[in-house]
Amino acid sequence: MPLAWGALLAVQAAILFAFPSGLLVHLLNAGMVAAMLLLGVALLLRRAPREAMWALPDASVATVVVAAGVTAVVLGVELGTWLVLIGAGWTVLGLAGVVREVRAARGGGR
Amino acid sequence: MSATVVAARPHGLLRSLSGTDHKAVATRVIGTSLAFFLAGGVMALLMRTELAAPHLQVVSTETYNALFTMHGSTMIYLFVTPFALALGLYFVPLQIGAADVAGPRVALLGSWLYTFGGVVMYAGFLAKTGAPRATWVGFDPLASAVHSPGRGMDYWIFGVTLAAAGLLLISGCLLATVLRRRAPDMTLLRMPVFTWAIVASVLMVVVSFPVLIVAMALLFAERQWGDLLGGGVTYQHLFWFFGHPVVYVMFFPFIGVVGEVLATFSDRRFFGYVFFVASLLLFASLSVSIWGHHMFTTDAVATGYFSLASTLIVVPAGVEYFDTIATMWGGRIRASAAFLFAVGFLVEFLIGGLSGIWVASAPIDYHANNSYVVVAHFHFTLVGGSLFGIFAAIYYWWPKITGWMLREGLGRLHFALLIVGVNLTFLPQFALGEEGMTRRIADYPAAEGWATLNLLSTIGSYAMGAAVLVFLLNLAWSWAVARTAGDDPWQGQTLEWATTSPPPRHNFDRALPPIRSHAPLWDLRHGDEA
């Protein structure tokens, strides 16, 4: 489906060449077409069998910590390096927590 | 498809805030977006009060500029778009027979980035220089450090970036869910119309939201280090590449809702399903290709191409209208609140859509651009369209989400007030724009003769406010004196009605009904007629 939609976008992008347009317009169109075609090809190549059973995490505090960490890093760009460092620390901690959750789920759910 | 839940340790509030059940995540995003809607609505009422008569000075010019910037930003980045995607996050897994969304942690991360982004954006009100005043677009160089000094503008940039990143993650999860988590018999062409509408929406999000994030990064960098964008036109290309598709991200899910609601309350299968799906994908492909029509007056775009492609939108839109109206034709209509809002959507969005064809013509746009004609156009599509679609979705799916019913009588009163309010607010604005009233002005000369139409528009906005109050009353009353909904109060057609209200953790605790079309429950009920 992404491939088909990407092909439709490609047709429209091609039609634009018949009109005088700047480089940025063509680049934006080309990027969009490329992204869709890449996604479509990736999905075709990675035709993983549908799992009959998979493990669902019930809650993930670590993920919320990652979100807070990323927000703090972004805000820290404005408010100071101290906040960037705090945010980076939370993000790393949060990601470590997510990895732990995934490993626990793989051990317990399958 | 089945799944096993891995038990988690957190309890109580921590569990509520970190739960990965797609329904819990979606409900939280919906609740947050509705809170932002109320805030944005108050800002709108303040603006309309200022414009009720000339020289009122209810708020200063600077405050007015901040109000229209934050009103637009709230409604687009923090209310309608998140609400639409959250509706998909709740119902797409149910409609396709999946036990959960693909990548539930990613969806959870996205929900919190959106929430934090909203808080950061609103932090601008606390900044020394106040909230930003560069419009919801953040036009460069108006948004530059010279013309928008101070942290308020920076917080706006951060807020937009975080919210957009969050919504992009949620959209990725939805796309992966549709492609990888459908029930065994649920082929792509058996997915319900709402799910297809969400698919078309997330395709647009995936393509356009990354460009917004790049635009925000470049805008921030320019505020720190000087001219990097090479002028305002470059920024406009990057921004509108996102800014046009996002208005369809705010519309498509609700045409999907309207399709479901009209089919259910007409007791008919959706008419022209395959053509509808094809039109959604064609509509989406056109929508990501026509951003230049926001830039006709810059004289820096191929007006012929963008005008032609923008006008072509009428083809898939027409197919969708024809299909939704034909769905009702000859049906046994039940005029529930959800049905009324769905019909209201069709009427109000039609006004907005037809006026869009008008401004899609470059020569007409040269006159209409930056006037109240444009304001009326997009408010009819977004308020008349998306807002009516939102309320149709709420009245339709509230029983499924909560397990209790909203009051139909209050729902009809809500509808009546809203339809009067929307038309009284925005129809006069077409005339105001035609008479030359520019948008984004805090005051106007009495000699222009715009006072009467502005007063009518303001009265209409108060009627809209009253409609929202009736809605809130309906929520409170229905919660206080709850009436149980049951699994399927409406005789729905799609799989979410085949499970309990609210659904269990893994969505279905009984075998799915046979899936032979996009309306499995309708097929089950009508047997030989299907």
Image: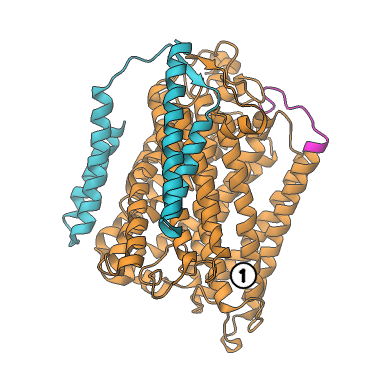
Residue for point 59% across, 45% down: B390
Q: Nearer the viewer, residue B474 or B275?
A: B474
In the figure, the orange chain has which letter?
Answer: B
* Image spot of residue B143 (x, y percent): 40, 68
Tell me which residue sits at (67%, 22%) in the image. Answer: B487
Where on the picture, by quarter, is residue B63? bottom right
Whether residue B147 sits left or right of residue B2 in the image: it is left
Q: Quadrant of residue B504?
A: top right
- The magenta stretch spans which residues? B479-490
Say what secondary structure mark 1 lies in.
helix
Q: Is residue B486 located in the magenta-colored stretch of the structure?
A: yes
User: How many residues crowd around disc 1 within 10 Å: few (fewer than 14), some, or many (20 or more)?
Assistant: many
Residue position for label 1:
B47
* Amino acid on which disc 1 is placed: Met
Q: Report the chain holding disc 1.
A: B
Q: Is residue B290 visible?
A: yes
Characterize the magenta stretch by its predominant secondary structure: loop
Chain A, chosen colour in render: cyan
Q: In the rendering, at what x and y percent does residue B367 appear?
A: 40, 75
- B41 horizontally vs A62: left or right: right
**From where the camera sits, is residue B326 visible?**
no
Q: Is residue B482 magenta?
A: yes
Q: Please say if B436 is above or below B463.
A: below
Q: Residue at x 59, y 21 (%)?
A: B505
| Residue at the extreme front of the image, as rendered | A82
